[in-house]
Amino acid sequence: MALDQPPRELARRILHKGAVGSYGLCDVELPDGQRTTLVVLAHPGAAAVVPFLDARRIVMLRQYRHAIGGVIWEIPAGKLDAGEAPELCALRELREETGYSAGRLVRSGEILTAPGFTDERIHLFCAYDLTPGSATPEPNESLELHEVELAEALAMVERGEIIDAKTIVGLMHAARAVGLRA
């Protein structure tokens, strides 16, 4: 069996198209010849950013997320607009959610969020040389800003207080960027 060969898509049925992408069913032939139907959310991708106030302190969000029924710790992030470069999305989301503008943005990695059912890819960045401004969150965003020591954010991950995957990976990459052990 050649797993490096992509499955052959036989048919795709879009069941719903909305703000986060299109949801549907794909009939595929897998590399081993087996045929099956897969549920797929086609997503435009996203960007997330760890904003550094200085070498030790970052900006984090506590944000209400209806899908999980509560508030979680996150780094600023959002969905790519049509045709938007991940770097521009990261800068836009940073400005909208925190009010800060970055003088310098450095790519730190990327993650696949849930490859069993979506192609969503989140591009990760670190932002430096921040200039404060006014936040303009979307009407559906309920969030508050917090200045947190990066070392404390990593300890929060260890204690299970930060459970958002993009945030955990973003913090690990940020720690590596400034020479902290994650």
Image: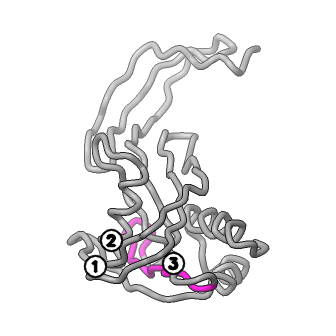
Q: Which amino acid does label 1 sit on?
A: Ala
Q: Tell which circle, 2 or 3, labels the residue nearer the N-terminal end.
A: 3
In the figure, is residue 178 to the left or right of 125? Answer: right
Circle 3: is it few (<14), some (14-19), or many (20+) Cα within 10 Å?
Answer: many
| Residue placed under numbered mark 3 in the picture | 73
Seen from the viewer's position, the closer of residues 74 and 31 is 74
Determine whether the residue tagged by mark 3 lies in a helix, strand or loop. strand
Residue at (26, 45) in percent of width and height: 18
Circle 1: is it few (<14), some (14-19), or many (20+) Cα within 10 Å?
Answer: some
Proximity of marks 2 and 3: CB atoms separated by less than 8 Å = no
Alpha carbon distance from label 2 to label 3: 18 Å
Q: Tell which circle, 2 or 1, labels the residue nearer the N-terminal end.
A: 2
| Residue placed under numbered mark 2 in the picture | 95
Q: Which amino acid does label 2 sit on?
A: Arg
Q: Is residue 91 found inside the magenta-colored segment of the image?
A: no
Circle 2: is it few (<14), some (14-19), or many (20+) Cα within 10 Å?
Answer: many
The x, y position of residue 131, in whole percent, is: 38, 80
Alpha carbon distance from label 2 to label 1: 6 Å
Which image quarter holds the N terminus?
A: top right
Residue at (60, 71) in percent of width and height: 163
Residue at (61, 87) in percent of width and height: 149
Range covered by the magenta-colored residues: 56-69
Determine whether the residue tagged by mark 1 lies in a helix, strand or loop. loop
